[in-house]
Amino acid sequence: MVASFESRFAIKFQPGYNHQARTLDFLHRPIGPVVHRPFLLYVVFTFIPRLLVLFLFTCVFGLKRRRNTATGYTYWYREPLPSSSSSSSSASASASASASASAS
């Protein structure tokens, strides 16, 4: 076997015994203790953070989820607050109407 290796790769090994050579003993050693993790553990650690984010975004920040029909992406958004300009414009309209009525 050594002779065929030497002729194939054009290498010549020196005869002798090498005390520093080691075997591939790690391939035959038993595997250490295996830690068993139940499937429920993975389910809990996957869905609990998602539920916390859902609660935080919807209840605390007041965000809503929408899906873009063109791209299919899901995003969070906050509905605009009711504009105060419509209430102030009606107040200014009533004030101008009362001012014109008092002027005549």
Image (cartoon, helix red, strand yellow):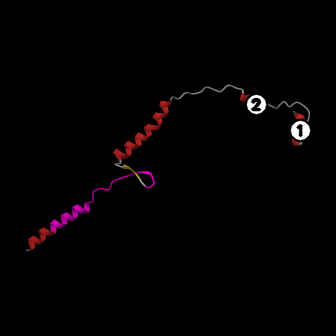
The answer to whether residue 76 is left or right of residue 97 is: right
Across and down, in percent, residue 91 comes to 18, 63
Q: Residue 103 magenta-drawn?
A: no
User: What amino acid is found at the position of numbered circle 1 in the picture?
Assistant: Glu
| Label 1 – label 2 distance at C-alpha | 22 Å
Across and down, in percent, residue 63 comes to 36, 49
Q: Quadrant of residue 94?
A: bottom left
> What label sits on residue 90 in the rendered view?
none
The answer to whether residue 92 is left or right of residue 38 is: left
- What's drawn in magenta, residue-wise? 70-95
Query: Among all residues in the image, which is located at the extreme front?
Result: 70
Q: Secondary structure at mark 2?
A: loop
**Depth check, front residue: 9 or 102:** 9
Closer to the chain start, of discs 1 and 2, is 1
- CB atoms of marks 1 and 2 within 8 Å: no
Across and down, in percent, residue 46 comes to 47, 37
Q: Return the residue at label 1.
A: 6
Q: Quadrant of residue 32?
A: top right
**Depth check, front residue: 102 or 12:** 12
Q: Return the residue at label 2.
A: 24
Residue in the image at 37% along x and 42% along y? 55
Across and down, in percent, residue 45 comes to 47, 36
Q: Residues within 10 Å of mark 2 (few under 14, many from 20)?
A: few
The answer to whether residue 3 is left or right of residue 87 is: right
Q: Residue 78 magenta-drawn?
A: yes
Please identify, in this view, whether the residue under mark 1 or under mark 2 is nearer the observer: 1
Query: Among all residues in the image, which is located at the extreme bottom?
Result: 104
Q: Is residue 71 above or below residue 59?
A: below
